[in-house]
Image (cartoon, rainbow, N blue to C red):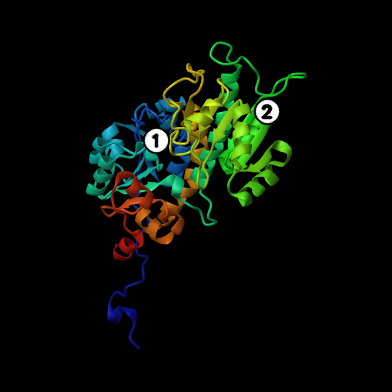
Amino acid sequence: MKTESEFGAMPLPQEMATATTRRHMTVGLPASNIDNERRFPLTPEGAGLLVAQGFTIKMEAGAGNSIHYTDNAYSREGTQIVSRSEALGCDIVLHLAPLSCHDIRQMRRGAVHLSLLSKCNRTKESVKALMDRNIINVALDLVEDRYGNTPFADILSEIDGRAALAVAGSLLADSVHGKGILLGGVAGVIPCETTIIGSGISACAAARAASGAGSTVRIFDNDVYRLREATKELGTCAVGSALHPRVLRSALRSADVVVFTQMTNPPVFDTETVSEMKKGVIIFDLTNDCGAAFPSLPTVDLALATPSGPENGRCCYVHTGSAVPRTAAMALSNTFLTFMGDISASDGVLNALKMHEGIRKGAVTFMGKIVNAEVAETVGMRSRDIAIFLTLS
C-alpha cells in the first residue's frame, strides 16, 4: 500500500463560507404632507424594534413632530435622519395618507407604498402615478391576520371611538362655545344622552367611554346578530335596538352626542331629521366617507382644527383619531412589528403577497394595475384580480 509521501500532499476537507444573510430592506418614513393626517406610523421605540429585526429605517427630518418626538429620539434608536427624497427612495415607504403625484414620482420603480385606504384623499391622478411607477400599494386597514381579523383597522377604530367621546366631553363642557355641561351629569342632574349608530369596534369603544363618563347610551344597528354580540359584550353599559326609523329618530332628537360608525347599508340623515336634533348636539362620523351620512351638515376636520363648538349650532366632526395622533402612533407601532416580521420572514412584500392571503387582501395597485374594486370605483377605473398577476410574477 502506498504511503502519503508517495502520493504527494493529500487534500483535506475544509469548510466553505456561504452567504446566508439577506439584503436589509430599507423603510422610508416621510413626513405627512396631507393636512388632514396628523397620525404617524412609528414611535422611536417602534422604529428601534424594527431596526433590531434587520430593517434600515430612514426618516425625513422633522417627520415625528406631529406626535411630539424629536429627530434625536429616533436617531438614538438607530433611525437614520435623511431628506424627503431619500426617505421616498426606500424599498418600502410608510406614509399613512396616499402620497401625492410628486412624491410618487420620486419613489423607485417597483417599490412598496404602505398606506391606509383613505378614500377621501384618493385621486385618479395619484392612482395613475402609482400604476405608472409599478408601485405596490397596500392599504393597511384592509390587511387581515391569520384569524381573519383586521389588526390595523381594528386598533384605529377603537382609538376613534374613544377619542370621539373625549372630544365630545370637552366640547360639552366648554362654557364659551359649548353648553357648559358635564357628559355624565351629577347627583340630581340628568346625564347627557349618547346615541351610537353601528355596533362594531369603534361603536363599542365609544359606548364604553360614554358609559364610563356617566352618559346614558343607546346603540343602534341593522345587523341584529352583530348588535346582539355588542350588547352582550357591553352588558349594562348600553341599550341596544334595531334601526327602527321612529325609535332612532326619537333617540336622535334627545341626543347630546351622536356617533356614526361603520356598518352594512348605512342610513343617510336628511335635512329634516337633522333639523329636529338639538341645536348644540355634537356629531361624529367615524367612517371613511367623511361626513357622507349627514350631507346637510358642514364637516369639521379634527386633523386641521382645534375642536370648538359649532358656530351655527350643528356640524359633523371627522378624522377623530387625528385628535390623539401620539396614541395612534403607539398603537400602530405594536401592530407594525408583527406585520413587518411577516414581510421579513417572507423575504419581501412580493413573496408576502403570495404566501399570506390576508396581506393580499390589502393590495390596491400591483404591476401597474388596480387590484382593489373599491378604489377602482372611487376613481372611475377598472380593477383586476391580483391572483392573475401573482401567478405570472
Looking at this view, is 211 or 105 the one in front? 211
Tell whether label 1 touches label 2 (CB within 8 Å). no
Locate the N terminus and report the quarter of the image it occupies. bottom left
Q: Amino acid at mark 2?
A: Ser
Looking at this view, is 353 or 248 the one in front? 248
* Position of 169 relative to 261 (above/below): above
- The residue that disc 1 covers is 79
Residue 7 shown left or right of residue 49 in the figure: left
Q: Which mark is residue 306?
A: none
Quarter of the rendering containing residue 251: top right
- The residue that disc 2 covers is 215
Looking at this view, is 102 or 331 the one in front? 102
Q: Is residue 136 visible?
A: yes
The residue mark sitting in front, 2 or 1, is 2
Which is nearer the N-term, disc 2 or disc 1?
A: 1
Q: Amino acid at mark 1?
A: Thr
